[in-house]
Amino acid sequence: MQDIQRTSEYQAREVFSRLPAGRVGEQDRKYMNEVLDAGFGNSDRCDMNVRFEKALAEKFSAKYAVTCANGTVSLHACLAAAGAGPGDEVIVPSLTAAATATSVVYCGAVPVFADISPDTFTMDPEDVRRKVTPHTKAIIPVSLYGLACDMDPIMEIAREYDLTVIEDNAQCYLGTYKGQPVGAIGHASSWSFQGSKHMTTGGDGGAVTCSDREYMKRIKRVMGFGYPTIEAESDAPRTVPRDVRQDRDFRRHPTFGYNFRMPVTSAALGLAQLERLEDLVEARRIIAGLYEDAAGDVPWLIRQKVPEGYGHSWWAYVCRVDEQMLGADWRTFRKKFIEFGGDGLYSAWYPVHLEPTFLRMNFYGDAYRAPNFHPLYKGNVKSYSRGDCPVCEEVQRTLVQFKTSFQDYDTAVQQAEALKKTVEYFS
Ligand SMILES: Cc1ncc(COP(=O)(O)O)c(C=O)c1O
């Protein structure tokens, strides 16, 4: 069993009582009204993105933060700003949301899949080391389900081979690794505010935090059309004088960029959600504790291991089901959980390298146009197939993901009760 710090029912109810219904509270309305009252011009009239970015940087222990449209383009911009492109490889875990890998393809680089640890389900640093080649440009460790990767060896590999490490913390808010806050270990960290995440900016949204001024400037310029007026600081004074900026000979695109910006209305919601992030994370920890108690100590439910010194943020509560010990299969387990009132239990994502689009490599239409066949690419990854990441391929089939996103305590208790009944049924 995991050592999840328990909270009394009274304290738990207190935490949940601070979470507003529908995830929209007074602060959300206040900031949204500020935006609406200011009206819309060519630019943000109440500095909402700047305010959100400054708060994000502070909360995630970084010098700089930038908001963007989602947690996929945030990865894309970090990779592009690190120089990842045709000819390069980027190492990603095989168990993750596909966005981690597709962002590599968006840059024209080749995703190389590293296997996972069978205990923590996160990227295995030893396999990362095996997969480094002279073509490797970056590594994207994913804090899966809210648990950090083993970052020390990953950073060591990066130092040895001069690689950029982009933490994908879409699922990990306020997590820690050996006392360090998640997000402040790699060269940059990517965040997602999509609706299933601990905090949301109203459906979609993302951010990058980073403490390297030059790297952040490049990331922000990739996100903002390459404008030379963009600096790492959110509230940087304009370094290009108005007469220069407004002149007919002013060139706006010394470097290439996209429009990955976050709308100001989303920033208003994000700022409000960030202010209650501790409660949002605490509520998920409480729910994980309820599941933990409900699961008891049956040997066929094998928990995601939380190594000593790691602070899990419980985006989901995840276990392996040992079908042999259970005496039933994964689908029967899921069916029973739902019959006992469980809320649609999910499997883990299919191993990304085995998703049809990766098997077919039809990223840009035909496989021969894939980054793997670009003339600049001199590496050996010419196909993806079963056997590339054997641990992931085996473990993924056994995983059950329980939701921790309930915003009221009674629903959470009822869900844990459904798990308890399921465990009793099979015991
Ligand atoms: C690990 C991981 N990376 C990246 C993403 C992509 O984020 P978004 O949906 O905001 O684009 C997600 C979630 O959706 C995710 O879970």
Image (cartoon, grey):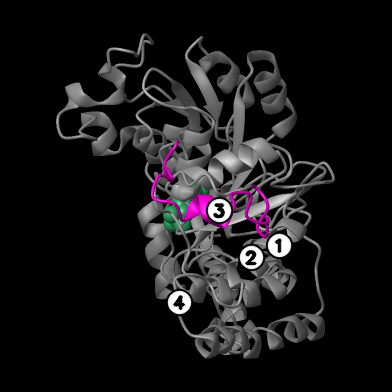
In the displayed structure, does residue 372 sit left or right of residue 167? left
Q: Nearer the viewer, mark 3 or mark 4?
A: 4
Place of residue 255 in the rendered image (x, y in percent of width and height, measured from the top left): 44, 36
Residue at the (67%, 27%) spot, across then down: 154
* Amino acid at circle 1: Lys
Label placed on residue 170: 3
Picture layout, residue 383 above or below residue 7: above
Label placed on residue 54: 1
Q: Nearer the viewer, mark 3 or mark 1?
A: 1
**Disc 3 and disc 4: Cα gap in Å?**
31 Å
* Amino acid at circle 4: Gly
**Disc 3 and disc 2: Cα gap in Å?**
21 Å
Where, by quadrant of the figure, is residue 277 drawn? bottom right
10 Å crowding of disc 3: few (<14), some (14-19), many (20+):
many
Q: Earlier in the sequence, mark 4 or mark 2?
A: 4
Q: Is mark 3 within 8 Å of ligand 1?
A: yes
Residue 62 appears in view: yes
Q: Nearer the viewer, mark 1 or mark 4?
A: 4
Circles 2 and 1 in contact, beta carbons < 8 Å: yes
Which quadrant is home to the C terminus?
A: bottom right
Q: Is mark 2 within 8 Å of ligand 1?
A: no
SS at badge 1: helix
Q: Is mark 1 within 8 Å of ligand 1?
A: no
* Amino acid at circle 2: Val
Q: Is mark 4 within 8 Å of ligand 1?
A: no
Label placed on residue 50: 2
| Highlighted magenta segment, given as a residue range | 232-254
**Disc 4 and disc 2: Cα gap in Å?**
16 Å
Q: Earlier in the sequence, mark 3 or mark 2?
A: 2
SS at badge 4: loop
**Disc 2 and disc 1: Cα gap in Å?**
6 Å
Label placed on residue 227: none
